[in-house]
Image (cartoon, helix red, strand yellow):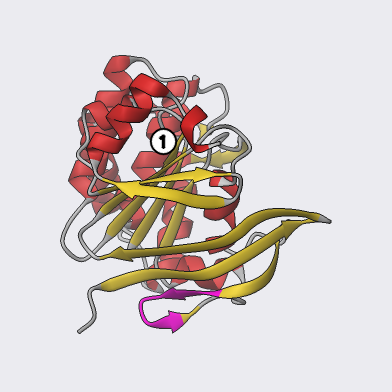
Amino acid sequence: MSKKLLEIKDLYVNAGEKEILKGINLTINKGEIHVIMGPNGSGKTTTANVILNNPVYQKKSGNIIFNEEDITNLKTDEIARKGVFMSFQLPEEIPGVSVTNFLKYAKNKITGEPIKVFQFKEELKHYMEELKMNSKNMERSLNVGFSGGEKKKNEILQMLVLNPKLAILDETDSGLDVDAIKTVSKGIEMFKNENNAILIITHNTKILHSLKADYVHVLVNGKIVKTGTYELAREIEENGYSQYK
């Protein structure tokens, strides 16, 4: 059985006429945490979006293999059902749809099984306690009136409940204070096991102070220019990205 969960092979991507990704290669194995770092505009969020085939971006060449299946041209909802989850940099507000109902519907679509409501709510309460979230938020409209920190914790809550094979976390640490980052990191640790993997997209190293990453990739101008361990992130924290531009 292959340990490989995600393979991105020589991927070139455009947004309109502009070339954004210029030959990305990346392999993520089960049980690993990978981080893609880079300055603003380097292609980090694009990388996350093209894995889920966001139609804003056009793949010009290359392939994306997930769990030994080519998902390059699958629809976003099909990719999600196969076990790919993405948290958003700016989570959407959905008036009239409660956190509970949103998660119940999403879980049902992924598992195809009826949800036992009492058991499901108990699971939600447990995760919300671990993430230091107010359990009353369960019945509030999704992200409506939530603070930035609450929205980011809500994304981690979704990850825990939906339990994907690959979690892509886009700028999950941006705008969070130290305590909130520790809580988000705790949620990631709760999720991580030997059969899943995590890809964190970030432009700073804050979240890496409380979370051990296996690999750090530096993405500059649409290319991965260096791969290393946590030491690489510390080097960037001290010296920035200027040497890679």
- The answer to whether 218 is drawn above or below residue 141 in the figure is below
Residue located at (23% from left, 35% from top): 231
Indicate the amino acid at tag 1.
Asn
- Residue 31: x, y in percent? 20, 60
- Residue 89: x, y in percent? 54, 36
Residue 200 occupies which quadrant of the picture? Answer: top left
- Residue 59: x, y in percent? 67, 68
Left or right of 8 on screen, residue 177 = left
Left or right of 48 on screen, residue 34 = left
Of residues 65 and 135, the one nearer the viewer is 65
Residue 108 occupies which quadrant of the picture? Answer: bottom left
- Residue 213: x, y in percent? 24, 43
Let me know if residue 199 is in the magenta part.
no
Residue 126 occupies which quadrant of the picture? Answer: top left
Of residues 44 and 179, the one nearer the viewer is 44
Identify the image quadrant of the N terminus.
bottom left
Left or right of 58 on screen, residue 238 = left
Tell me the residue that label 1 is attached to. Answer: 154
Residue located at (30% from left, 16% from top): 178
Instruction: Characterize the magenta stretch by its predominant secondary structure.
Output: strand
Let me know if residue 67 is in the magenta part.
yes
Residue located at (57% from left, 67% from top): 11
Q: Is residue 132 visible?
A: no
Report the magenta residues as a range. 63-69
Identify the image quadrant of the C terminus.
top right
Q: Please, which residue is most extreme toward the right here?
A: 17
- The answer to whether 188 is drawn above or below residue 141 in the figure is below
Q: Please, which residue is most extreme toward the front here?
A: 243
Helix or strand or loop: what does disc 1 sit on? helix
